[in-house]
């Protein structure tokens, strides 16, 4: 079966660092994505990992371990505008559609 | 370069009615995927269209149907609406890659459907 788990909610302080974890079990793994979604808006792309290791992009970094079925998103120097839901999604290439399988999202609240 | 567009932005329907949602893909993209996102949940894959055919379908009943037009735009139709169909409906477009499925998916702003 296909299953993606991430924490439901997290709270962090402005200026701090937060790590959002994601574990997955899927068939046809073809990459893992992190999206940011503000309330009432569409998801926006943050990062993509297909090979093991760390991908860094400004204040955001994402890590993948395919053998462990594990990823995390690291947000540094948190800002109030980072308060949003963070979605972990696995790209499933079975059927050649590369559909995205999403977790339920982690709602991050950044406090002053 | 226009991104993915969807219409309408918001829609209110009554149980039992039918609804049609529309999506225009990003320029250069030929594949459209539809997702349903209930409140507090992640998006769930409904189906994907390429070359005017449904290529794969998620775990959704036949009440959900779609269509893709020659210009690559797409419609999502839902019949016999239920209260549980209330959700944000997201369209994502991508480009088919030879022998490698589809490329990155870009999401539209979504249509908020409320069923009363």
Image: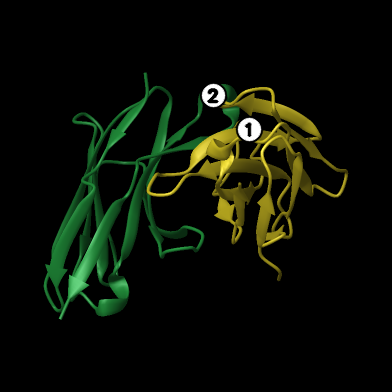
Answer with left or right where residue B24 lies relative to residue B102: right
Answer with left or right where residue B48 lies relative to residue B58: right
Q: Give a yes or no on whether discs 1 and 2 share a subunit.
A: yes
Q: Residues within 10 Å of mark 1 (few under 14, many from 20)?
A: many
| x 34%, y 43%: residue | A104
Q: Position of residue A96 (x, y in %)?
A: 58, 27
Along the line of sight, which residue is nearer the eye, B38 or B103? Answer: B38
Quarter in which the N terminus of chain B is drawn:
bottom right
Q: Position of residue A62 (x, y in %)?
A: 26, 54
Q: Position of residue A27 (x, y in %)?
A: 39, 22
Q: Residues within 10 Å of mark 2 (few under 14, many from 20)?
A: few
In this view, A10 is above or below A51: below
Along the line of sight, which residue is nearer the eye, A29 or A10? Answer: A10
From this viewpoint, is residue B52 visible?
yes
Looking at the image, is mark 1 or mark 2 nearer the viewer? 2
Q: Quadrant of residue A18?
A: bottom left
In this view, A58 is above or below A36: below
Q: Which residue is mark 1?
A: B47
Q: Colour of chain B?
A: yellow
Q: Which is nearer the N-term, disc 1 or disc 2?
A: 1
Q: Which residue is mark 2?
A: B59
- Chain depicted in green: A
In this view, B34 is above or below A82: above
Answer with left or right where residue B61 lies relative to residue A51: right
Chain where mark 2 sits: B
């Amino acid at each position: 079966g296909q299953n993606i788990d991430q924490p439901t909610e997290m709270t962090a302080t402005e200026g701090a660092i937060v790590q959002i974890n994601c574990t997955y079990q899927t068939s046809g793994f073809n990459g893992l994505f992190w999206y940011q979604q503000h309330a009432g808006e569409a998801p926006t792309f943050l990062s993509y990992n297909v090979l093991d290791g760390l991908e860094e992009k400004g204040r955001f970094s994402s890590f993948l371990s395919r053998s462990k079925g594990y990823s995390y998103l690291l947000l540094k120097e948190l800002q109030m505008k980072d308060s949003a839901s963070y979605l972990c999604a696995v790209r499933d290439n079975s059927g050649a559609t590369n559909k995205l399988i999403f977790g339920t999202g982690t709602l991050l609240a950044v406090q002053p | 370069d226009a991104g993915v567009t969807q219409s309408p932005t918001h829609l209110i329907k009554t149980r039992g009615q039918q609804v049609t949602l529309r999506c225009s893909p990003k320029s250069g993209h030929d594949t459209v995927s539809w997702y349903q996102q209930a409140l507090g949940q992640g998006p769930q894959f409904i189906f994907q269209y390429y070359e005017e055919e449904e290529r794969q379908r998620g775990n959704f009943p036949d009440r959900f149907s779609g269509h893709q037009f020659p210009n690559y735009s797409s419609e999502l139709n839902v019949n016999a609406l239920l209260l549980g169909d209330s959700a944000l409906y997201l369209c994502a477009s991508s480009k088919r890659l030879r022998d490698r499925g589809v490329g990155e998916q870009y999401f539209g702003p979504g249509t908020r459907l409320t069923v009363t």
